[in-house]
Amino acid sequence: MPAVAEARPQTAAAPYSAGIFSGPVFEMARRQFDRVADHLHMAADERERIFMPKRAISVSCPIHRDDGSVAVFTGYRVQHHLTLGPTKGGTRFASTVDVGEVGALAIWMSWKCALLGLPYGGGKGGVTVDPFSLSSRELEALSRRYMQEMIPFVGPQIDVMAPDMGTDERVMAWFMDTYSMYQGSTVTEIVTGKPVECGGTVGRREATGRGVAYCVRRAMEHMKIAPQHATAIIQGFGNVGSVTAQELALQGVRIVGVSDHTAAYYDAGGLDVEALLEHVREHRVLRGYSQESLCDPDELLTRPCDILVPAAMERAITANNAAHLKCRILAEGANGPTTPEADRILAERGEDLFIIPDILCNAGGVVVSYFEWVQDLQRYFWGHAEVREKLEQSLERAFQRVIARAGRDRISHRDAALALGVETVRHAKQTRGLFP
Ligand code: GLU
């Protein structure tokens, strides 16, 4: 054997090089992957081929501020694998964004798309910026400049962006417009999550929250919890958290707690979801909604409830609070809300706690993004009923596969979901072979 081959790590325990990716979120994605790779008896070199992102792009985005000065923001895009089709995933505007986080989120998108049977690799992008610190004009300038910098690296058959934390339909419209202006014609299929009037699909805005609520409904059936007697706490009141609250309330669930980065509220008698939405429409954030029901945001997660929906940041449920959770269903609306340490603690509860892992629970968003891309490519648009029915079919299939796999292999729902996703990518790579 040549010396090079001998030097290659051959055991699962061998150290790996994370390259430019570092930080706790990337580390978490790696630990989750290694658990599943152990379960799938994957050799060390195959792990690196499947896990490490294919491309990472960093761009500097200068914009004119309203006061006449120039500010420069750093943006990233990570494209995880190109084996199944274009890469797909959101763009995040948040002050916490770094390349390690974006890399982890891109990797999670891969397992999510594969679990749901979508013809995509995972992608994710982000700009390190607090979007609340920008005026509407500055936000538009940054969105357009970020997309302009990304033009050499994206395309409807290369990498398709979507909303994530801190971005919305407006930002997607600016992305689409910027790309189209450079192409010289309207290319709606370049991003998903657009407003319906410029090539978006009906039902995309609500899709992630609806998907969360659908999975919760199925979990309640498993746990024999009647929605009319159930209570829920939702951390995060952006697009995902707020729609989840609305949809759960429609099922008869009492929403007893909500929070965002500005305030947390708890009322055992139930909060008025419509009034909360109205407040956020007017003030952008939850702060100032009420004095009586104010509570400590960290404590909110450990208050009594049947359903806990972390729908904000990664690493909300950690070794510090996992043992104190009272919920029976943990519905992961956010990406990566539960750390591996917390997972270990929660596993001790056995069948008493039903975890709906993120790559299943929040997959409704990317499923309807896929529908939007298909509709844009065909220039043929579907109605509400069709989108909703196809979304529920996709989630139901994935939900059943996860439960069945967990039962068959005696593993957690998370490991089952990840195993199904990772396995799909692994098989596709094995079948296509290694080029050249
Ligand atoms: N950002 C969302 C996610 O994390 C949606 C991605 C998409 O629609 O492409 O799943």
Image (spheres, rainbow, N blue to C red):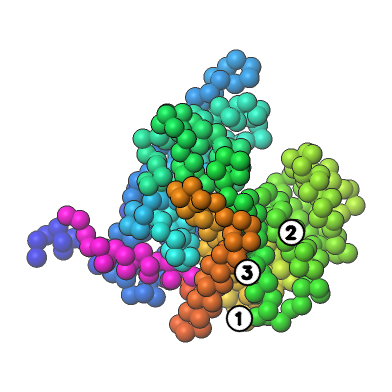
Could you say where residue 423 lies in the image, as x and y percent from the top left?
Answer: 37, 70
Task: Choose the circle earlier in sequence order: 2 or 1.
Answer: 2
For the record, the magenta segment spans 417-436
Residue placed at 77% from the left, 42% from the top? Answer: 281
Mark nearest the camera among 2 and 1 is: 2
- Mark 2–mark 1 distance (CA, rounded to whole Å): 27 Å
Which label number is shown at residue 215? 3
What amino acid is at disc 2?
Ala
Asked if labels 1 and 2 touch by Cβ distance under 8 angstroms, the answer is no
Q: Residue furthest top?
A: 68
| Tag 3: amino acid | Cys
Q: Which mark is residue 245?
A: 2
Above or below, 201 relative to 317:
above
Which numbered tag is attached to residue 350?
1
Q: Say if residue 141 shows up in the picture.
A: yes
From the viewer's side, name the closer residue of 411 and 205: 205
> In what element is the residue under mark 2?
helix
The residue that appears at 20% across and 56% down in the rendered structure is: 435
Whether residue 167 is visible: no
Q: Is residue 173 above or below residue 85?
A: above
Q: Quadrant of the N terminus?
A: bottom left
